Image (cartoon, grey):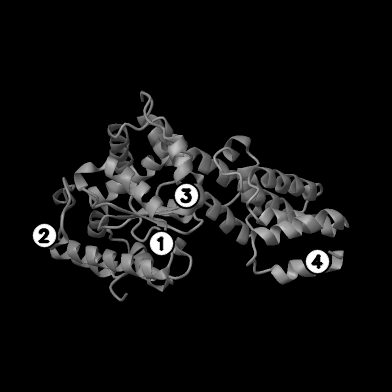
Amino acid sequence: MTRLFLYAALILSATNVLAEEVLPWQHAVDSAGLEREEKNMWADAEEFDKALERSGKVRNEPALTAYLQGIMDKLYPEFGGKIKIHPINSSHLNAFALPNGSVYINTGLLARLQNEAQLATVLAHEGSHFVHRHSFQQAVHVKSMATLALIVGMAGVPLVGDIVALSSMMGFSREHETEADNIGYQRLVGAGYSAKEAPKTFEHLIAEIKALDIDEPFFFASHPKLQDRVDNFGELSKSATNGEVGHEAYVLAIKNVRLFALQEDLQAYRFKQLILVLSDAERRKEYPPEAGYYLGEAYRLRNNDGDPELAKREYTLTIELAPSFAPPFRSLGLLHYKQGEKGSAAPLFKRYLELAPEAPDREYIEAYLKDIGT
């Protein structure tokens, strides 16, 4: 842990390396053959990997990890799995690359992307940071004490907490980000993906951020702005031909991620975000039927005029589409109960307990049933 955030020392010790001498990797490499400064950066990155794994934030879903890794290997086949993908359980719109080839992508970002081509856009961009050794180049050329202080200050961020502040631990320069766009685009097209999806990857993120009137996610604060991504990829894809989009494969692969992201948003009372995403008919098609429950909960939390009825509608629809999913039975039952419709609430409570016999609120629901007289 003590070495993990010592990039400040590396910045000072690596100043004898010239940028033009830092050539991109052509194939999978081993840290044993690196010069001391870069070898130290790889060792720190590997320590970071282990610490983040211990923190429990890395998502344990082998099928998802294999799916993500397969896309990265398709984009960078000559690296033979050296660029390793790690999904992270975090709601922030974030992805980042480490000097040793580890690439992290958050469930929050996965949930917002719409297809495999958009995912490939992100992964190709991040993979290029490793291939072109941007972390090492950045360390060589950082002179600003303000930047130095930022890197050193990140040592105070707890790994076991929210990793948002770790997401850009070596924020790349605008020049490196533009280069990553260009190289990533070439990889995207070379792998047969639709380049027309590249600017769309970030367009709907911008729309969401503007609609919610929030600051840009941390990932994009140290990267160039989201609009830069759209502009760069828009220019690159002007003459793009059709390619693979991979919508169905993507929807299937991240079904659990989307439900997890909705649960995270609900637990954090981000009901505005839930309503914005799930009330959009086109976006709603990307989510499994259980998503209606979370939209119902968002309406319940917002509690504007008419929201209880909107919540009822969503709970009822979810029960119809996903009859073995327990939560909407409970929520719809509670709404009926609180509105004095106890006769309608009782069968819903009973079905909830049948579907979730080990429910942590079982005694709570049984008390309602006792009050109803059943």
The Cα atoms of the two marked residues, 2 and 3, are separated by 35 Å
Query: Which residue corresponds to mark 2?
Result: 33
Local crowd size for mark 3, using a 10 Å CA cut-off: few (<14), some (14–19), many (≥20):
many
Is 298 located above or below residue 158 in the figure? above
Are circles 2 and 4 on residues that touch, CB within 8 Å?
no
Classify 200 as above or below 166.
Answer: above
Q: Distance between the residues labelled 2 and 4?
A: 68 Å
Q: Is 91 displayed left or right of 85 in the figure?
A: right
**Which is more N-terminal, label 4 or label 3?**
3
Q: Give the residue number, with chain letter if any, for mark 3.
A: 109
Q: How far apart are marks 1 and 3 (CA)?
A: 14 Å
For badge 4, the amino acid type reads Tyr
Q: Where is residue 351 in the image (x, y as percent from the top left)?
A: 71, 56
Q: Residue at x 69, y 43 (%)?
A: 320
Query: In the rendered structure, which disc, 1 or 3, sits on the residue that comes first in sequence?
Result: 1
In 3D space, how far apart are the residues under numbered discs 1 and 4 (Cα atoms)?
39 Å
Check disc 2 and report its element: helix, strand or loop: helix
- The residue most toward the left is 33
In the image, 83 versus 185, the foreground residue is 83
Q: Residue at x 75, y 44 (%)?
A: 313
> Between 281 and 359, which is closer to the camera in this rendering?
359
Q: Earlier along the polypeptide chain: callout 2 or callout 1?
A: 2
Label 3 sits on a secondary structure element that is helix
Mark 2: few/some/many CA within 10 Å (<14, 14-19, 20+): few
Note whether residue 184 is visible.
yes
Q: Specify the quadrant that holds the N terminus.
A: bottom left
Q: Give the labeled residue for mark 1.
A: 58
Is residue 268 shown to the viewer in this render? no
Q: Distance between the residues labelled 3 and 4?
A: 39 Å
Q: Residue at x 80, y 65 (%)?
A: 369
